Amino acid sequence: MFTKRWLPYWLILPAAIWLGLFFVVPFYSLVASSLFDPHGSVLTGYQVTFHFDNFVDVVQKYWPHMWRAMWWAVVATLLCLVLGYVLAYAIAFKTGRWKNLVLIMVVAPFFTSFLIRTYAWKLILADKGWVVHALQSVHILGADGRIIQTPVAAIAGLTYNFLPFAILPLYTSIEKLDRRLIEAAGDLYANPMKTFWKVTFPLTLPGIVGATLLTFIPAVGDYINAELLGSTNDRVVGQDIQSLFTTTGDYASAGALSVILMLVILVMTLAYVRKAGTEELL
């Protein structure tokens, strides 16, 4: 029973039990709730009646919120990639003996609650805050202009909160880059821009793909930034799921909306990875 043949299976058994209890079982429960009888309630109970119309109903009702969440996540992901790539490149090539300190500064926000960091942005972008005052001084915002409770504030919060998720995989990919290839491109009279697109970018593509996935996937389902920084008129799908589960008690709609969101993210992820030509990441 404890022979060498069975040893690998015994080693993965704890992880398999963990995944079964905290992933497979909750996932099954979520899918089951999406097929509940919509006429049930928390008080009377729900029954799995395979009511597939739940999916049609939530799509018709909440598709603008899902589209808004996708759009905000795409913009935030692009900002994270641009800012993260520049910072990761600087850390890998320019910081020298200060590299570890800068990496600690990148990871440091994780030691603070996600909620506290978002509340901090609410104070920073407040109507009487220094950011709004500075933008009004240079006439980017009008005298009555504001940032808080706008899509700009929500996207700024998403970008800040998920930026470390982009920096770390980008840094790992750039750090492994053979600098002799960059020097060789210069020796062949390639200018810095051409060297980047022909050498650096293709070789760091796995890091870019990883950073995109680690940023986009949680950003789509996030509702904290939209709740605290966005407007009540600009709801996203994460807010709808949270409200349906905890406030309304409509488990059928909440489950159906969650399953649809997961399927949409899965399809987009597979299409993106396939388009990027890095299927081995899967």
Image: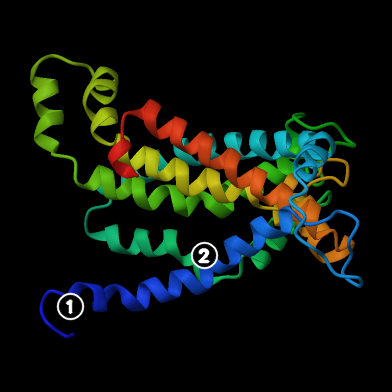
Q: Left or right: where does residue 172 sit relative to residue 136?
A: left
Q: Count neighbours of disc 2 (C-alpha within 10 A) and say few if under 14, some if 14 to 19, many if 20 or more.
A: some
Of residue 157 and residue 257, the one placed in the foreground of this image is 257
Of residue 266 and residue 197, the one placed in the foreground of this image is 266
Q: Earlier in the sequence, mark 2 or mark 1?
A: 1
In the structure shown, which secondary structural element does the residue marked by tag 2 occupy?
helix
Quadrant position of residue 227: bottom right
Residue 127: mark: none
Q: Which residue is mark 2?
A: 24
Q: At 29% from the left edge and 73% from the top edge, which residue is drawn?
A: 12
Q: Is residue 91 visible?
A: no
In the structure shown, which secondary structural element does the residue marked by tag 1 occupy?
helix
Q: Which residue is mark 1?
A: 7
Q: Left or right: where does residue 199 sit relative to residue 33?
A: left
Figure colour scheme: rainbow
Residue sticking out furthest to the front: 49
Q: Image quadrant for the C terminus? A: top left
Of residue 38 and residue 133, the one placed in the foreground of this image is 38
Q: Count neighbours of disc 1 (C-alpha within 10 A) and say few if under 14, some if 14 to 19, many if 20 or more.
A: few
Q: Residue type at mark 1: give it.
A: Leu
Q: At 78% from the left edge and 48% from the top edge, which residue is drawn?
A: 51
Q: At 72% from the left edge and 38% from the top edge, which residue is drawn?
A: 66
Residue 105 in the image: state x and y as whole percent: 42, 62
Residue 261 in the image: state x and y as whole percent: 65, 44
Q: Left or right: where does residue 218 sit relative to residue 229?
A: left
Residue sticking out furthest to the top: 189
Quadrant position of residue 106: bottom left
Q: Report the Cα–Cα distance between label 2 and label 1.
A: 24 Å
Q: At 50% from the left edge and 49% from the top edge, which residue is drawn?
A: 163
Q: Image quadrant for the N terminus? A: bottom left
Of residue 39 and residue 278, the one placed in the foreground of this image is 39
Residue 57 in the image: state x and y as whole percent: 83, 40
